[in-house]
Image (cartoon, rainbow, N blue to C red):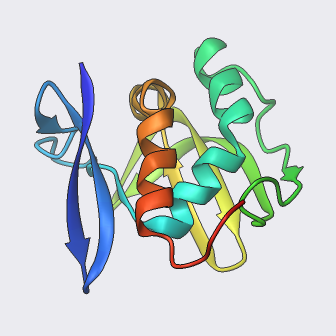
Amino acid sequence: MYSFREGTFIGNPILILLKDGEPVFEEAEHIRGLKFGIKKAKMIINTMIQIEEFFNSKGKKPPRDLEINIPPGKYDISCCCIKCIGFPRGSIIIERPYLKIRSNNTHIGFGLVKAEGLISLKDQIEDFIRRNDNRRWL
């Protein structure tokens, strides 16, 4: 079962993805947990259709190395996403598909397990944005 724990990073609010009450993969030697703040939360919501496609296809879609540009959307943040295979963790390459989302100089990447958590907690991500964003959204 997925959930979030809220925290702070350099005084800014963040969400930490949990599975069964523990950070996802944080105990694994080469894979980190998933933590993100307001901007990355907006990027995740803006690309949720691509995240769902990635998860539902078990990492087969979108096609590898095809950059998909996403218009600004609800939170006025344009993004692009790309599916890659093999993500670096130190000197190790983990040979699994992952989705990388980028907006200007900010990026976030995750595989199938974390994608499942983000999909199941979409409403909580949006609630986090509403409660913590300094800008007002109509």
Q: In which quarter of the image is residue 107?
A: bottom right
Locate the C terminus and report the quarter of the image it occupies.
bottom right
Residue drawn at x 55%, y 68% is 39
Residue drawn at x 52%, y 56% is 41
Residue drawn at x 48%, y 35% is 123
What is the number of callouts on the image? 0
Position of 97 with respect to 21 (left or right) is: right
Instruction: Give whichever of 95, 118 is nearer the camera.
Output: 118
Position of 107 with respect to 74 (left or right) is: left
Q: Quadrant of residue 137?
A: bottom right
Locate the N terminus and report the quarter of the image it occupies.
top left
Please state the horizontal and vertical placement of residue 76, each as a whole percent of the image. Answer: 78, 66
Please state the horizontal and vertical placement of residue 77, each as a whole percent of the image. Answer: 75, 66
Residue drawn at x 26%, y 33% is 3
**Residue extending furthest bottom?**
10
Position of 33 with respect to 122 (left or right) is: left
Please state the horizontal and vertical placement of residue 9, each as a whole percent of the image. Answer: 25, 77
Please state the horizontal and vertical placement of residue 74, each as a whole percent of the image. Answer: 76, 54
Instruction: Give whichever of 89, 127 is nearer the camera.
Output: 127
Please determine whether, in this image, residue 40 is positioned above or below residue 21: below
**Residue extending furthest front?**
138
Instruction: Give whichever of 14, 105 is nearer the camera.
Output: 14
